[in-house]
Image: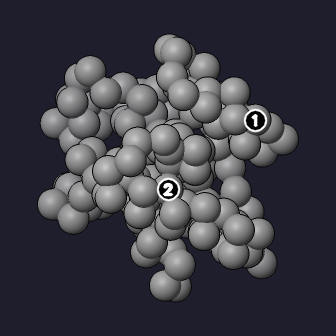
Amino acid sequence: MKSTVYLETTIPSFYYETRTDAEFIAMRNWTRKWWKERKDDFDCFISVAVSDELEKGDYPKKEEKIHLITGMEYLEINDAIEEIAEVYIANYLMPKDVVGDALHLATASYHKIDYLLTWNCSHLANANKKKHIRRINGRLRLSTPEIITPLEIMEE
């Protein structure tokens, strides 16, 4: 049985990253390497939160990013997941203005996904937040996905 992965919005975004700073180039390359070499080793999921975020705004390679997730399986977002996201925000796990991050984590946790794959190292893949995330999810009786970057999952 394959492990499950929730692809947060930064994954399709960095696949087609156009910024030329070395950090962004490295993140783009690791994302593409994971997509090419490891993606098929997992059952991959997204949610409407991912597609909604990709469809907002005007930015380079928007259509390519949206096309990249075409055909992926969506996880349901229900009232329970929205309440979980509100708990994360109320417990200062996520900032109030970053409902998307709380929703991604709540969706992956509720659906018992093994990995949440992201380049968001401020609010998600942050070593300082992981203990807090596990504590809050424990109180909510939720599993906590491993929150990792493509670089980390390549080394599994």
Q: Give the total of numbered labels.
A: 2
Residue named by callout 1: 67
Residue 28's disc is 2
What residue is shown at x 21% (from left), y 30% (from top)? 95
- Between 118 and 92, the residue placed more toward the observer is 118
Choose the circle earlier in sequence order: 2 or 1: 2
Asked if residue 18 can be seen in this view, the reply is yes
- Between 61 and 118, the residue placed more toward the observer is 61
How far separated are the C-alphas under marks 2 and 1?
A: 17 Å
Q: Is residue 23 above or below residue 11?
A: below
Asked if residue 76 can be seen in this view, the reply is no
Q: Tell me where residue 48 sits by quadrant.
A: top right
Give the x, y percent position of residue 135: 24, 58
Residues under numbered marks 2 and 1 in contact, where contact means CB atoms less than 8 Å apart: no
Determine whether, in the image, residue 50 is placed left or right of residue 139.
right
Q: Is residue 13 above or below residue 137?
A: above
Residue extending farthest to the right is 71
Q: Dividing the image into 4 quarters, which one contains the N terminus?
A: bottom right
What residue is shown at x 50% (from left), y 74% (from top)? 153
Q: Label 1 amino acid?
A: His
Give the x, y percent position of residue 64: 70, 35
What is the secondary structure assignment of the residue under circle 1? helix
Residue extending farthest to the front is 20
What is the secondary structure assignment of the residue under circle 2? helix
